Image (cartoon, rainbow, N blue to C red):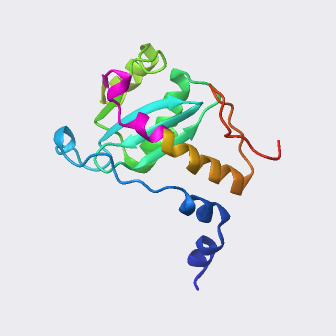
Amino acid sequence: MDTIAQVIHECETCAAIKQAKRLKPLWYGGRWLKYKYGEAWQIDCKRYVLTMMEATTGWLETYPVPHATAQNTVLGLEKQVLWRHGTPERIESDNRTYFRNNLIDTWAKEHDTEWHVHRSAEGKAEAYDCCSGPMLKASLEAKRCVSLKPLHSTDFKDKES
């Protein structure tokens, strides 16, 4: 076995995530057909985890943040989305204060990104919040190196802390 395959084969985090429940993308068509991979994202932030989902494929990116703020939203986008997938043309979010303020508006204008607001119940990223929890928990248990402070009670904690 070559080195990369061996590392993946022996990775405890990978094994734990493989055991987590797998999901199909929530939708395949509609308004997202005009976008190519990486051009449209939906985001949400629950329990101090910024959840970002690529709209055409359902690819999920998560970013742990110490607080739900506009600055952490921008950091999450820049650290998880921009360098991996390029600048999105469109972002959708709900109307929470950390998604709708001057910092977010300025960032969107600087990156030539349309930022659309919708009601919370319509978001697709919210649907992944319930599913990203088991994956994050499995990752944390295998790695034992990160501790998340939740907005609401949850068990996303490092067992050794």
**Which is nearer the eye, 131 or 96?**
131
Q: Give the range drawn in magenta.
A: 116-129
120 inside magenta stretch: yes
User: Residue farthest to the bottom?
Assistant: 1
Identity of the residue drawn at 35% across and 38% down: 41
Quadrant assignment, res 6: bottom right
**Which is nearer the eye, 2 or 9?**
9
Is 144 on the left-hand or right-hand side of 123?
right
Identity of the residue drawn at 63% across and 53% down: 138
Give the x, y percent position of residue 96: 45, 18
Quadrant assignment, res 7: bottom right
Give the x, y percent position of residue 128: 44, 41
Give the x, y percent position of residue 86: 37, 45
Judge whether 8 appears above or below 56 on screen: below
Identity of the residue drawn at 78% across and 46% down: 159
Give the x, y percent position of residue 78: 48, 37
Quadrant assignment, res 22: bottom left
